[in-house]
Image (cartoon, rainbow, N blue to C red):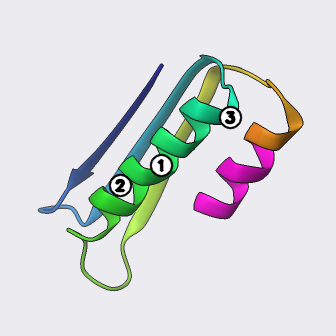
Amino acid sequence: MHKVRADTEKNRLYIHLIGAVDTKSAEEITDSILAETSKMKPGFNVITDLTQYKPGHLAAVKSLLQGM
């Protein structure tokens, strides 16, 4: 599971990853990040919460890193 949201007033992107991430989920997360990033102004900040993230398949990790 994941939550990605843009706070355009604070110009801040929030990313929260929960549990293990497979390749399909990694693609969905990357798509969410790109969609929310498009709402931001240049110079925005990102806060990523990985406290409940469990590393999954290496291909998924690679896909996530490309999206971030």
Q: Secondary structure at mark 1?
A: strand
- Let me know if residue 63 is in the magenta part: yes
Using residue 3 as the reference point, say whether residue 29 is left or right of it: right
Q: Residue at x 24, y 80 (%)?
A: 41
Pointers 2 and 1 in contact (CB under 8 A)? yes
In percent of width and height, residue 19 lies at: 63, 14
Q: Mark 3 to mark 1: distance in Å?
A: 22 Å
Mark 2 Cα shell of 10 Å, populated few (<14), some (14-19), many (≥20): many
Q: Which labelled disc corresponds to residue 47?
A: 1
In percent of width and height, residue 21 lies at: 66, 25
In percent of width and height, residue 34 lies at: 39, 62
Q: Residue furthest right?
A: 58
Q: Mark 2 to mark 1: distance in Å?
A: 6 Å
Pointers 3 and 1 in contact (CB under 8 A)? no
Mark 3 Cα shell of 10 Å, populated few (<14), some (14-19), many (≥20): some
Mark 1 Cα shell of 10 Å, populated few (<14), some (14-19), many (≥20): few
Number of the front mark, 3 or 2: 3
Q: Which labelled disc corresponds to residue 13?
A: 2
* The one of 28 and 54 positioned closer to us in this rendering: 28
In percent of width and height, residue 62 lies at: 79, 51
Q: Which labelled disc corresponds to residue 65?
A: none
Residue under label 3 = 23
Using residue 18 as the reference point, say whether residue 38 is left or right of it: left
Query: Closer to the N terminus: mark 3 or mark 1?
Result: 3
Q: Is residue 58 above or below residue 10?
A: above
